[in-house]
Image: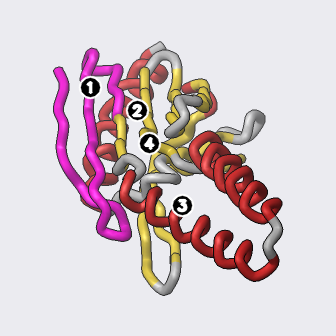
Amino acid sequence: MEDEKSFSDICGGRLALRCRYYSPYCREFGLSSARLSLCSLTAVTCAVWLAAYGLFTLCENSMVLSATIFITILGLLGYLHFVKIDQETLLIIDSLGIQMTSSYASGKESTTFIEMDKVKDIIINEAIYMQKVIYYLCILLKEPGKPHEISRVVPVFQSAKPRLDCLIEVYRSCQEVLAHQKATATSL
């Protein structure tokens, strides 16, 4: 079963949450943010190139124009490959673990997997960001020798920064999977 809902991020931008329920104990959540706007990209590129042309007319050195074009193209490629994340995905399987994937605008993907026996809980935490209180979903990891202590906190959906209503939906579904996993672990 697949479900798609529209939410907004902390800045008011549009986010699409795609929920896939493969089974009662395997769920995938994908948050897609707005794609790179061609209008804003063109406006920034034109502004940089016009400034370079103005500098060229002052110093009459063609290297200024060549360097500006080269730096602009490299900057754009770097932004698309290392910064702009189009989609973040959280896959939770009760018997295996949690996989987080970030898909960049260039097509590059970054994946992190956390084994389920290392997961203590999934919570919604709050933080102060730019004079606002924001909420974020995070995974609490157990200390290997001490199951009651937390070794690390791994934030989820860092790039998308969804609002609380979106996080609550993902949180509730993850808690259902974790509850089943804990119930089967205690029955063994």
Q: Is residue 16 magenta?
A: yes
Residue 145 in sight here: yes
Instruction: Look at the numbered discs 3 and 2 and tell me whether their residues touch, using CB distance below 8 Å.
Output: no
> Residue 144 in the image: x percent, y percent?
74, 34
Q: Which mark is residue 45?
A: 3
**Is the residue marked by circle 3 packed among few (<14), some (14-19), or many (20+) residues within 10 Å?**
some
Q: Position of residue 116 (x, y in %)?
A: 55, 26
| Residue at disc 3, secondary structure | helix
Q: Residue at x 26, y 35 (%)?
A: 18
As rendered, which of 50 and 113 lies closer to the eye?
A: 50
The span from disc 3 to disc 4 (Cα, nearest Å) is 21 Å
Residue 20's disc is 1
Q: Which mark is residue 184?
A: none
First along the sequence among labels 3 and 4: 3
State which mark lies toward you, 1 or 2: 1
Query: What residue is shown with label 2?
Result: 178
In the picture, measured across the screen, residue 26 lies left or right of residue 116, that is: left
Q: Residue at x 44, y 34 (%)?
A: 90
